[in-house]
Image: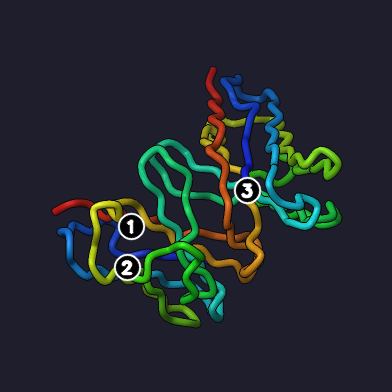
Amino acid sequence: IQMTQSPSTLSASVGDRVTITCRASQSISSRLAWYQQKVGRAPSLLIYQASTLESGVPSRFSGGGSGTEFTLTISSLQPGDFATYYCQQYITYPLTFGGGTKVEIK
Amino acid sequence: QVQVVESGGGVVQPGRSLRLSCAASGFPFSNYAIHWVRQAPGKGLEWVAIMSYDGKNKYYADSVKGRFTISRDNSKSTLFLQMNSLRLEDTAVYYCARGSDSAYNSFDYWGQGTLVTVSS
């Protein structure tokens, strides 16, 4: 299953609301996770089952969608949120990631 | 606390072999599936392989099938990745990641990664 993220880069300011889109090449129900990766660090799990926040993740992050279209929204961008975000489907092998969305400072 | 620590990376010539290890602590290792995920320099994430909690099931990405072998020693809370016939395109940081309790085949804990460089 191919995962396509858009945009590949997003320029935004602190306090902005940002939305990242992830599309699957076929239905994955809600078997979608989102990860945040900061430069030089391992990824960390933000959201699973398309919309469930991992423990400890701030509530400004939210996920939505099902089937083939998904979104990750940050309601008010904070300085620590500038990072690269990846979606991942886990309904079938091989597990696949989107190409990533880099959120950079405007 | 949950920790996974990779080791074994290094510089290797094309066609040669390397064995990575992932030492886990802070959780009942034998209850969890564990994955390898890699990231080529400046690129995105690529899932590599999974071994089930009991070692009975394993799956691989097409790009490594037949060359890489995943295994585990539950008595030592350690996962391995035997990489044979290495290619230039296998150059990457290799992460060990635990399969999530809440969403099987997502990854809730990651190691810091170990760098594998395939170069002549």
Q: Is residue A65 left or right of residue A17?
A: right
Quadrant in the picture for residue A72: bottom left
* Mark toward the viewer: 3 or 1: 3
For disc 2, the marked residue is: A20
Q: Is residue B63 visible?
A: no
* Tag 1–tag 2 contact (CB < 8 Å): yes
Q: Is residue B60 above or below residue B94?
A: below
What percent of the width, then of the height, locates residue B94? 57, 38
The residue sitting at 66% across, 65% down in the picture is B101
- For marks 1 and 2, the one nearer the N-term is 2
Q: Is residue B74 left or right of residue B45?
A: right
Quadrant in the picture for residue A36: bottom left
Q: Helix, strand or loop at disc 3? A: loop
Give the quarter of the figure containing the N terminus of chain A. Answer: bottom right
Q: Amino acid at mark 3?
A: Val
The residue sitting at 37% across, 71% down in the picture is A59
* Colouring used for the render: rainbow
Q: Helix, strand or loop at disc 2? A: strand
Q: Looking at the picture, do discs 1 and 2 lie on one chain?
A: yes
Disc 1: host chain: A
* Tag 3–tag 1 contact (CB < 8 Å): no
Q: Looking at the picture, do discs 3 and 1 lie on one chain?
A: no
Q: Amino acid at mark 1?
A: Thr
Q: CA distance from mark 2 to mark 3?
A: 30 Å
For disc 1, the marked residue is: A101
Q: Residues within 10 Å of mark 2 (few under 14, many from 20)?
A: many
Q: Which mark is residue B2?
A: 3
Q: Residues within 10 Å of mark 3 (few under 14, many from 20)?
A: some
Q: Amino acid at mark 2?
A: Ile
Q: Helix, strand or loop at disc 1? A: strand
What percent of the width, then of the height, locates residue B23? 70, 37
Q: Is residue B27 left or right of residue B12?
A: right
